[in-house]
Image (cartoon, rainbow, N blue to C red):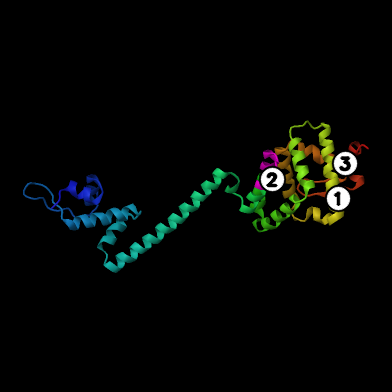
Amino acid sequence: MLTIGELASYAGVTVRAVRHYHAKGLLPEPERDHSGYRRYDAGAVIELIKIRTLTEAGVPLARVQELLRAGEAEFAAAVSEIDRRLRAEIRERQRRREQIARLTAGDGLVLPPEVVGFLDRLRTLGVDERIVRFERDGWIPLTAHSPERIPEWIARKHQQLDDPRLVDFYRTLSSALDLPGDDPALTGLADSMAAYISELADELGEDHLDDTDIEPPFAELLDTLAFDTVPAARRLIELLRTRGWTGWTKLGRVDTADRAPGNRRRS
């Protein structure tokens, strides 16, 4: 026969827990012996282990009491349900762990793998991290807005990056990020950008320049993000407009009559 301390030790709980289970009616409290001590048998150890196991699994004490009084079939079914719930919780916790792991990786927290791969490719090409950050922040609302279009758009972006001219543009833009708005380098960059766009339009057609079907208000939102993240982009758009093109997210041709007179391109 066991003392309450020995019972608690065998079952892996504290004496205080045993007394709590007595108070809740989960574990019968034996009569005291002639020496005034309560003595417990092996059955009490088994019962206490059941209580501990169920409570550790998150089963409320009221439900534990029901299960302890249930027949074998009902108890087995209840345990199976508890096991199913625990496995579901484990899967959910694993999903959250994966989210945390992606958080430490940065881009992958709210972006699909296709976008993360594209951003990694930009970094590999030597694109300034500020531009990569702008690209990343732009893809976040795009992903939330049109997740089904992401594979298509990313495939197009990779196809564009296969063109050395675009890669050169990204690298040149990277070197121009800290330049003032009147720096001649931005003018040269606008020339290169306009020439590249014109060549694409001639080779593939102007429809190819804007085939993403992004609504104008959403495109304006992304443009504003670009201007806030990459200040040189705003000046480039101004220079690009005098060269016949407009837009950052949605490229389009500008009619000659729409060009600002004071901003006509110098020959």
* Spot occupied by residue 206 in the image (x, y as percentages of width and height): 84, 54
Residue at image mark 1: 199
Q: Residue furthest bottom?
A: 73
Q: Amino acid at mark 2?
A: Leu
155 vs 111, left or right, is right
Callout 3 touching callout 1 (CB < 8 Å): no
Callout 3 touching callout 2 (CB < 8 Å): no
| CA–CA distance in space, label 1 to label 2 | 22 Å
Q: Amino acid at mark 1?
A: Glu
- Asked if residue 207 is positioned above or below residue 254 in the image, the reply reads below
Q: Which mark is residue 119?
A: none
Q: Amino acid at mark 3?
A: Thr
| Residue occupying the point 68% across, 43% down | 132
Q: Which residues are magenta?
A: 120-135
Most common secondary structure along the magenta stretch: helix
Foreground pick, 69 / 52 = 52
Q: Quadrant of residue 226?
A: top right
Q: Secondary structure at mark 1?
A: helix
* Spot occupied by residue 264 in the image (x, y as percentages of width and height): 91, 39
Mark 2 crowd level (few <14, some 14–19, many ≥20, 10 Å Cα): many
Foreground pick, 158 / 57 = 158
> Closer to the camera: disc 3 or disc 2?
2
**Reading the chain from its start, which is encountered first: label 3 or label 2?**
2
Q: Residue furthest right?
A: 267
Q: Is residue 68 visible?
A: yes
| Residue occupying the point 37% across, 60% down | 83
| CA–CA distance in space, label 3 to label 2 | 28 Å
Q: Is residue 26 visible?
A: no
**Reading the chain from its start, which is encountered first: label 3 or label 1?**
1
Residue at image mark 3: 242
| CA–CA distance in space, label 3 to label 1 | 17 Å
Residue 167 lies in the magenta-colored region = no
